[in-house]
Image (cartoon, rainbow, N blue to C red):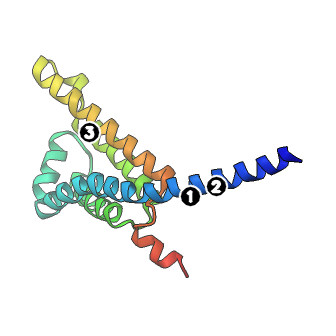
Amino acid sequence: MSTSTFGAHSSAATRTANATTLHAADPLLLLGRVLIGSIFVVSGYAKITAVAAFAASLEKRGVPFASTLAVIGACVEFFGGLAIVLGVEVRYVAALMVAFVIVATLISHRFWDIQDAAARQAQVTQFSKNVAIIGGFVMLVAAGGGRYAVERLWRRS
């Protein structure tokens, strides 16, 4: 009898502790979304406003259909970053951003093709940074946007 009482009390305490921890995570999820998403908003905006230059850089790297893919890439980068910051469909957008960062990394940070040691090391660093960013997006896929996300407004009804 005392075991079941202890188990019930322990279970209630665990639920309360878990709920407190989850609510404490919400401001951190917001901060993380703002930090990771803002990089893409700023960079995407620069690409949208100079899409011809972005297309030329893609073409120089041998990307087929560079003009079309530049528009798509710039829009995904800008609007995807904005959606992450605001908290709109965070899990889906974070998954899209994982794919985007993988493609962008494979196009722009091909360190294995570079002979110069200093330039190669710079691209290894950029490649590694993008792998870390992918990790951040994977965590958003798992955790979602938290309570401080626009998507919570339309899910309350």
Q: Residue furthest bottom?
A: 157
Image quadrant occupied by the C terminus: bottom right
Labels 1, 3: front one: 1
Instruction: Name the residue beneath numbered marker 2.
Output: 15
Callout 1 environment at 10 Å: few (<14), some (14 to 19), or many (20+)?
Answer: few
Instruction: Name the residue beneath numbered marker 3.
Output: 107
Q: Residue type at mark 3?
A: Ile
Q: Are marks 3 and 2 in contact (CB under 8 Å)?
A: no
Residue 109 at x, y = what percent?
Answer: 23, 34
Q: Are marks 2 and 1 in contact (CB under 8 Å)?
A: yes
Cα–Cα gap, marks 1 and 3: 43 Å
Cα–Cα gap, marks 2 and 1: 6 Å
Q: Residue type at mark 2?
A: Arg
Let me know if residue 100 appears in the view: yes
Instruction: Name the residue beneath numbered marker 1.
Output: 19
Residue 9 at x, y = what percent?
Answer: 73, 52
Q: Are marks 1 and 3 in contact (CB under 8 Å)?
A: no
Residue in the image at 33% along x and 37% along y:
132
Residue 32 at x, y = what percent?
Answer: 33, 52
Q: Residue type at mark 1?
A: Ala
Q: Residue furthest front?
A: 2
Residue 150 at x, y = what percent?
Answer: 40, 72
